[in-house]
Image (cartoon, rainbow, N blue to C red):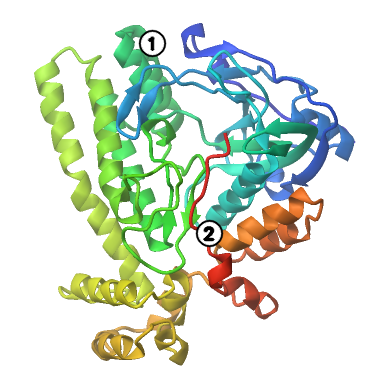
Amino acid sequence: MTLTIPFDNSYARLPGAFYARQKPEPVGAPKLVAFNDDLARLMGIAPGEVEEMAQTFAGNAIPDGAQPLSQLYSGHQFGHYNPQLGDGRAVLLGETVGTDGIRRDIQLKGSGRTPFSRQGDGRAWLGPVLREYVISEAMHALGIPTTRALAAVETGEVVLREAPMPGAVLTRVAQSHLRVGTFQVFAARGDLASLKALTDYAISRHYPDAQGSMGLLKCVRDAQASLIAQWMSVGFIHGVMNTDNCSIAGETIDYGPCAFMDSYHPNTVYSSIDRMGRYAYANQPDIAVWNVAQLATALIQQMEDKQAAVEEATEIVHAMPDLLQEHWLTRFRAKIGLATAEEGDLQLISDLLTRMAQNQADFTNTFRALGSETARDQFTDPAAYDVWAETWQARTARETDPHATMHTANPAFIPRNHRVEQMIQAAVQGDYTPFQRLSAVLTAPYDDQPDYTDLTRPPADSEIVRATFCGT
């Protein structure tokens, strides 16, 4: 059996200003750790022998039809503009059009140095690769738009971080790798021809019904507003919402220092590089608006009537906070069993969240347990829950089936930080059993799975993960 990937590479047909032609750097002794058969079938990929796939997804063998390249982009990093970033440790092999008609990129992440690497080694170590594999696939199972993981490969080489670590390569799949920063780099350079070509390409690939630059802006705004509300509804904290990590397609991209909250608090931060809390849980909606405003600024550069463009873009961006709030309220209504809308719902939800923050209640387990005795057990002062529950029960009495609504909105299983860290530590020692177990249970996060109840447990004090890292 031979690995077959039906490439159809539209990005490689764009002008050379958009990328650098770049092959992956070969590695010493590739070993296939994981391959996503379900995703491969969706993409029309026929898997090959294990050794062939290890060689291909490590970057040692270039499959027929691939046109390897590294993409150019820039971006605001923690609010400060960096004029050139680009794929410093990734190579886009090409694209396929799946059996569902969707075009997807195939990218090797951790495949060696590129012209955009700056001081980096272009490599990844095993921990971040497994982390992204598990969490991105968990996000997909939760129903949240995301890049996905097709394969993970050990390289047989050591990379230096805080200490020598086993190297690895992730094969990441995305509806595209177009970012806000992709538009910013051409706008900042005054390269209006490339900016126009990029705009036309993004519309054609992602939003064919969009009318021009402002139509694209509106579509990206809508996609991001929906995405961020979904993050909030499962307690997800991205950790590094720079504009180069803001996908035009509206997918979650870059799982570096991300995390899911255990105990709820709106100011929760895990990312070790987010020292000022810019990307804290509660700040994510505001940052999404800020990122879309940067896209607007870039798109305006190509418009002939700048004043009219500024006015239209301002209206589009200023509408985003209300749109985000609408999506957020819909998601959180469902989380407390409300399929209908009433005026006091926002206050009811906010009151619960305030009480959860004051009582160190576990975010996932509290919502999953609403209506049962175990919900009050999540609170350091159970009476705080009881007071809220009395009002809530009066409200849900006017609903048809609140428990069914909650069951499909509140996962039982998330990739908890301490379990992810335990999985990584085991894998470094050659034991992939925790990785396989965690991956299996997270394919059905909304199902009760009695054999895996240990994976619903919050961390003990000694297990708490207080900081997450980029892995670069």
State the quadrant of the N terminus. Answer: top right
Residue at screen point 33% across, 48% down: 277
Q: Position of residue 198 (x, y in %)?
A: 40, 18
Is residue 30 visible to us here? yes
Q: Closest to the observer: 296 or 304?
A: 296
Is residue 208 visible to us here? no
Quadrant location of residue 293? top left
- For residue 134, above or below residue 275: below
Q: Position of residue 234 (x, y in %)?
A: 43, 62
Residue at screen point 60% across, 26% down: 90
Residue at screen point 66% across, 66% down: 441
Q: Position of residue 461 (x, y in %)?
A: 53, 71
State the quadrant of the C terminus. Answer: top right
Amino acid on which disc 2 is placed: Val
Q: Does residue 93 appear left or right of residue 294 in this picture?
A: right
Q: Closest to the observer: 300 or 212?
A: 300
Q: Which mark is residue 194?
A: 1
- For residue 406, above or below residue 132: below
- Which of discs 1 and 2 lies nearer the camera? The answer is 2
- For residue 18, above or below residue 284: above
Q: Earlier in the sequence, mark 1 or mark 2?
A: 1
Q: Does residue 465 appear left or right of residue 35 in this picture?
A: left
Where disc 1 sits, the SS reads helix
Q: Position of residue 196 (x, y in %)?
A: 34, 14
Amino acid on which disc 1 is placed: Ser
